[in-house]
Amino acid sequence: MTHSIVGPPTSWERALIASLRAAYAWSVRSSERRAMHEVARMTGVVMAAHGPGVGPVTPREFAKALHGRLGLLPAIADCGDEEIADAVLLSGDCLTDVAFDLACEYAAPLGEAIDKATWMPSWTRMRAEQIQQATYSAMIGSGKQEVYVDSRKFLIEHPAVPSEADLQELVASTGALLAPNGYQPIPSDQIHHVGGGTTWWWACPTCRWPMAVTGNRVRCRYRPHTASYKIVSGAKASARPSLDRIDSGPRVATPVAQPGADAVCVETGIWRFIVVPGATELRLYRELTKLGAAVALWPDLDDYDLLVAVGITEHKVDVKEYRSARRLVDNLRGARSSIEVLLPDTHEYQFAILKDALPKSIRVTTERRFLARVRKQLKEHR
Ligand SMILES: [Zn+2]
């Protein structure tokens, strides 16, 4: 699971949150009349963090700064996190992928007075917990573990569907309990527009959410989902376009273009906080089950992610996929020793950092190590 800031944001965190909000607002300023007002308000927040006479003082100067390394902003320079200092939030008029990642880890309210911009997407305004809360209260409505698991699986397995009618039908056939308004039309920057108003979208091979479309490039917003493609138009403008893989990552089936006109998908917050970690949790669930372990997902209405049993030996595991290892270390202080932290393959590089930074009582493993241990136990158990 991904969690966000615990306690009120510090000065550099406020500057980071304001930068993320300003970058988002800047990216939609041609279609959203309130956007420049938001950039101006966030310039004020960053100026307050910097003190008089330091850093950008106009919205345009601030927007210009957001096209460079965040570490160049004095308020963020000493944040002590290289991933954040090196991050660039805007490329041209588009939000970068790193902006989405950081936004999701650092999403937090900036206080009543400046949090009235309800036109902004939820990830710019709310803590991860708040987004999760709204979604969870619907899913746990029945109080039954199996309904909760089915509902959560539903979001992870169907983060985008061809139409609202299809969604209703699927929901009815599975009995999933979903929060109202959890699905929305696919945002325009995740849609490929061809002539005559025809539109297409492609599901990420890993998380199945519509990939971002930038010019003729197509890729998931979540960077660890590395498959990247180039659009190849059909002979006729009306023909279904196809994709050519342009990265050298592991082979996966090439996504097929799906009509965009009526399609709906879960909103960004649900995608990043439930679907992205969920794709890893379900993958681990399937792998461990296939090995022969007894696995339960999100036991006790999501007390943790996976309960893995080999005979009478039980492992309680929480999967962590943070972009910022430092943020993860901060959030893990005080974690329960009964639950092991598992870094998926994509985040294995954080293992040494966590081992160094965390007290011994907090147990950390990686996907590779954990699977090897379970395999060994299964062999001994047979
Ligand atoms: Zn993805």
Image (cartoon, rainbow, N blue to C red):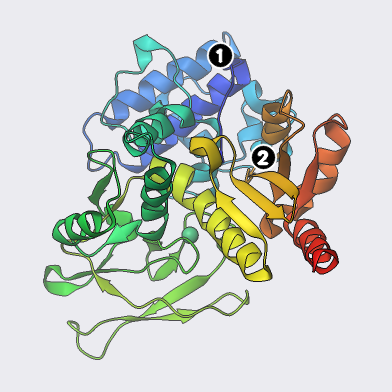
- Identity of the residue furthest to the bottom in this view: 235
Q: Is residue 223 above or below residue 73?
A: below
Residue 104, horizontal then vertical, whole percent: 50, 38
Which residue is the site of mark 1?
Answer: 8
Q: Residue at x 18, y 60 (%)?
A: 169
In the rendered structure, the answer to whether residue 347 lies left or right of residue 10 reads right
User: What is the quadrant of residue 178 in the picture?
Assistant: top left
Badge number at residue 324:
2
Q: Is residue 355 visible?
A: yes
Separation (CA) of disc 2 from disc 1: 19 Å
- Say above or below: 5 vs 211: above
* Coordinates of residue 298 in the picture (x, y in percent): 53, 44
Query: Is label 2 in contact with label 1 (beta carbons under 8 Å)?
Result: no
Crowd rating for badge 1 (residues with CA inside 10 Å; few <14, some 14–19, many 20+): few
Please provide percent x and percent y for residue 367: 72, 57
Indicate yes or no: mark 2 CB to ligand 1 under 8 Å.
no
The residue under the point 53% across, 58% down is: 282
Q: Amino acid at mark 1?
A: Pro
Q: Nearer the viewer, residue 370 or 321?
A: 370
Q: Is residue 127 visible?
A: no
Please identify the quadrant where the N terminus is shown.
top right
Q: Looking at the image, tell me whether mark 2 or mark 1 is earlier in sequence order.
A: 1
Task: Give the residue type that dot 2 points to.
Answer: Ser
How far across and how far down the image is residue 83, in percent?
68, 41
**What secondary structure is found at the residue carrying circle 2?**
loop
